[in-house]
């Protein structure tokens, strides 16, 4: 019998098994806790709660370690490609030459989007956020690509996965082009995954887009750095929604919605807007540091802090290096990069940030790299979503094939009104008997004047 945890409740001692991971992480298995003790655990934000055992990504927040299937992210960024990293995450190993070639061919074959889907874009108001459009379009894909009958589960998963990996990138570029009122640029069979995306975004009939290998490589590294991050908010959303045995498109759409949040993937757009605000104010960073520390001010230093990393996010360092490489290649200066570096320097010297273990995370420099590539601010989180898709898919697939996997249905501790009686309308309006006690009088919901529908 392995190590156990002892729990003493109401004078009784209970033993709970301890699970030890391949990197020595330890967890108390509480799956039988309620049956044994009648108690549940409570952990808002799940900061101390593991939802699964996974073999995909390992993070050590204290040491700033990030590995995918055991390979450090620094090595993948230096030696791999986004398509190869996607294969690694989804299939659990690096592909052989022929496998990688076949995978790339499949991604190319599935890169077109059903023509009827084009009209969906025109139904959104022109100023709609691209993340809203992306989440809707991914769910809509199911209508055009229903279940593949007659195939084994793994064959159906492989085709669905390849379709989604390729089409998400195409749909993202389409939303940008159509938001400009421009003609959609189709994917080309002669271009790589990343080069195709840049071409679909920026090529146009009167000014053909000149592909630059350095920029294509920068985008490849950008997406490798975003490919997976164990049980982050959006991946947890994909797993929870996927646990109801819904199709992959719907589960990924839930992940896109979660990623859109400013505390999560939406932070990359917020960082740039914060840096632009600092620039507009003359470039002084200290007032923003002071605001971030002020508990009465809801402002946060966007791109700083992390639930897991208690040191520098290893991806942020690589991202900063990529910013310099791309700006040097373009022979361009970006004043926001200088502001970002001064902001980082000031923050890391400040005891508040040191005491709270707040360091730059993946979002702090990513917007500056995307700006250099010509990506508009409101597409930054879409870029994060394209990068994170292989991770969402790998995690969904791992959970779908886990014999232990059940529908996710957390418990709660009820702290509301204990049993009471139904109050007839007359009494509620105080027309009969005691009027409702003032402190019990409910707030006046729905009293706000709602905008026109
Ligand atoms: C991503 O999980 C992942 O892996 C996510 C991600 C991925 O690849 O999937 O890495 C991508 O989402 C990166 C994070 C992007 N978000 C931001 O940059 C937004 C700014 N950061 C924060 O809001 C915050 O740091 C979070 C959301 C990232 C983490 O929140 P936690 O772990 O819930 O921490 P918390 O909000 O409880 O803060 C703990 C303390 C608080 O102070 P006290 O009340 O304890 O005194 O730290 C303070 C917070 O006020 N704090 C900050 C801060 N982040 C935390 N104070 C100022 N500025 C900040 N950015």
Image: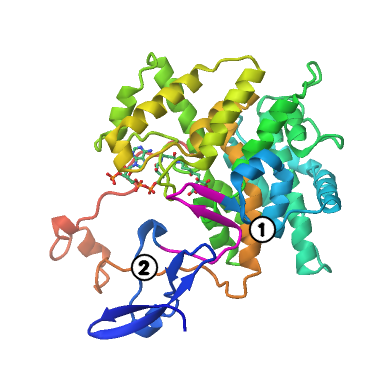
Q: Residue at x 85, y 48 (%)?
A: 101
Q: Quadrant of ligand 1?
A: top left
Q: Residues within 10 Å of mark 2 (few under 14, many from 20)?
A: few
Specify which label sits upstream in the sequence, 2 or 1: 1
Q: Residue at x 45, y 25 (%)?
A: 340
Q: For residue 421, which quarter of the picture?
A: bottom left
Residues 357 and 49: in front is: 357
User: Residue at the spot x=58%, y=66% of the render?
Assistant: 243
- Magenta region, mostly helix, strand or loop? loop
**Given contact means CB atoms under 8 Å apart, are the residues at marks 2 and 1 in contact?**
no
Residue 63 magenta-highlighted: yes
Q: Any magenta on residue 83?
A: no
The x and y percentages for residue 366 are 55, 32
Kindly state the secondary structure of the residue where label 1 is placed. Answer: helix
Residue 187: image location, x then y, percent: 81, 35
Residue 210 lies, with reference to residue 150, above or below; the image says above
Magenta-highlighted residues = 49-66
Residue closer to the observer: 270 or 309: 309
Q: Which residue is mark 1?
A: 248
* 324 relative position to 212: left or right: left
Residue picked out by circle 2:
412
> What color scheme is it?
rainbow
């Amino acid at each position: 019998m392995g190590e156990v945890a002892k729990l003493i409740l109401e004078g009784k001692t209970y033993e709970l098994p301890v699970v030890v991971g391949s990197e020595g992480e330890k967890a108390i298995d509480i799956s039988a806790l309620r049956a044994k003790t009648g108690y549940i655990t409570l952990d808002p934000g799940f900061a101390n709660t593991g939802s699964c055992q996974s073999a995909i990504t390992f993070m050590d927040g204290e040491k700033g370690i990030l590995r995918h299937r055991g390979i450090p992210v620094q090595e993948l960024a230096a030696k791999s490609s986004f398509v190869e990293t996607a294969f690694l995450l989804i299939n659990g190993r690096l592909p052989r030459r022929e496998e990688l070639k076949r995978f790339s061919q499949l991604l190319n074959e599935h890169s077109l989007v059903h023509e009827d889907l084009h009209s969906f874009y025109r139904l959104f108001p022109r100023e709609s956020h691209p993340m809203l459009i992306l989440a809707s379009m991914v769910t809509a894909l199911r209508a055009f690509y229903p279940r593949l009958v007659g195939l084994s589960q793994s064959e159906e998963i492989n085709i669905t996965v390849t379709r989604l990996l390729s089409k998400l990138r195409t749909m993202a570029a389409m939303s940008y082009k159509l938001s400009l009122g421009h003609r959609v640029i189709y994917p080309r069979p002669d271009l790589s995954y990343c080069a195709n995306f840049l071409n679909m975004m920026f090529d146009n009939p009167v000014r053909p887009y000149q592909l630059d290998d350095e920029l294509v490589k920068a985008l490849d590294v950008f997406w490798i750095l975003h490919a997976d991050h164990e049980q982050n908010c959006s991946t947890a959303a994909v797993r929870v929604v996927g646990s109801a045995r819904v199709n992959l498109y719907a589960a990924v759409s839930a992940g896109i919605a979660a990623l859109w949040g400013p505390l999560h993937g939406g932070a990359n757009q917020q960082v740039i807007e914060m840096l632009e605000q600092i620039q507009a104010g003359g470039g002084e960073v200290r007032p923003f540091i002071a605001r971030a520390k002020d508990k009465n001010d809801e402002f946060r230093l966007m791109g700083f802090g992390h639930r897991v990393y208690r040191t520098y996010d290893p991806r942020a360092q690589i991202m900063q290096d990529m910013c310099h490489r791309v700006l040097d290649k373009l022979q361009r200066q970006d004043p926001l990069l200088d502001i970002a570096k001064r902001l980082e320097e000031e923050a890391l010297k400040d005891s508040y940030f040191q005491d709270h273990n707040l360091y730059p995370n993946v979002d702090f420099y990513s917007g500056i790299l995307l700006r250099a590539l010509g990506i508009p601010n409101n597409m930054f989180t879409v870029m994060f979503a394209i990068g994170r898709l292989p991770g969402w898919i790998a995690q969904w697939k791992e959970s779908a094939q886990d014999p232990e996997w059940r529908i996710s249905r957390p418990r709660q501790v009820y702290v509301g009104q204990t049993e009471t009686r139904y109050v007839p309308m007359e009494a509620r309006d105080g027309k009969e008997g005691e009027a409702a006690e003032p402190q019990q009088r409910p707030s006046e919901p729905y009293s706000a004047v709602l905008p026109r529908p």
